[in-house]
Image: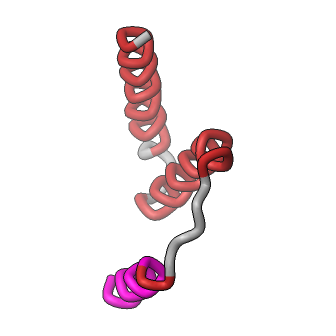
Amino acid sequence: LGVAAAVTGAVFSALAYVAVRRASRTNGTMVIVFYFALFSTVGAVPFAVPVWEWPTAWEWLVLVAVGVVT
């Protein structure tokens, strides 16, 4: 199972590199970053929802601080 996960991760990583390289021919950097983040989020949601835990008050404060500072 571990080897299958590693190979699957390598394949999807390679696909992402190829997609970014092809997209860079016709799109700007910000467009590529936006869509990469969008598709990564959509792909992660099915795995995150079953184990989701709401952040504590301290964690919310840290998240907001990081958002403001960066």
Residue 50: percent from the left, percent from the top?
67, 45
The residue located at (32%, 88%) in the rendering is: 69
Query: Is residue 66 within the magenta segment?
Result: yes
- Tally of marks: 0
Of residues 42 and 63, the one drawn nearer to the viewer in this rendering: 63
Of residues 67 and 18, the one drawn nearer to the viewer in this rendering: 67
Q: Is residue 51 left or right of residue 4?
A: right
Query: Is residue 65 within the magenta segment?
Result: yes
Instruction: From this view, report whether residue 12 is shown above or below residue 35.
Output: above
Q: Look at the image and give the residue range highlighted in magenta.
A: 59-70
Residue 11: percent from the left, percent from the top?
43, 18
User: Which image quarter: residue 6?
Assistant: top left
The residue located at (50%, 47%) in the rendering is: 26
The N terminus lies in which quarter of the figure? top left
Residue 61: percent from the left, percent from the top?
43, 87
Instruction: From this view, report whether residue 57 is shown above or below residue 11.
Output: below
Instruction: From this view, report whether residue 43 is shown above or below residue 27.
Output: above
The C terminus lies in which quarter of the figure? bottom left
User: Which image quarter: residue 66?
Assistant: bottom left
The residue located at (60%, 48%) in the rendering is: 51
**Which colour assignment does the render follow?**
secondary structure
Residue 12: percent from the left, percent from the top?
46, 25
Q: Main secondary structure of the magenta part?
A: helix
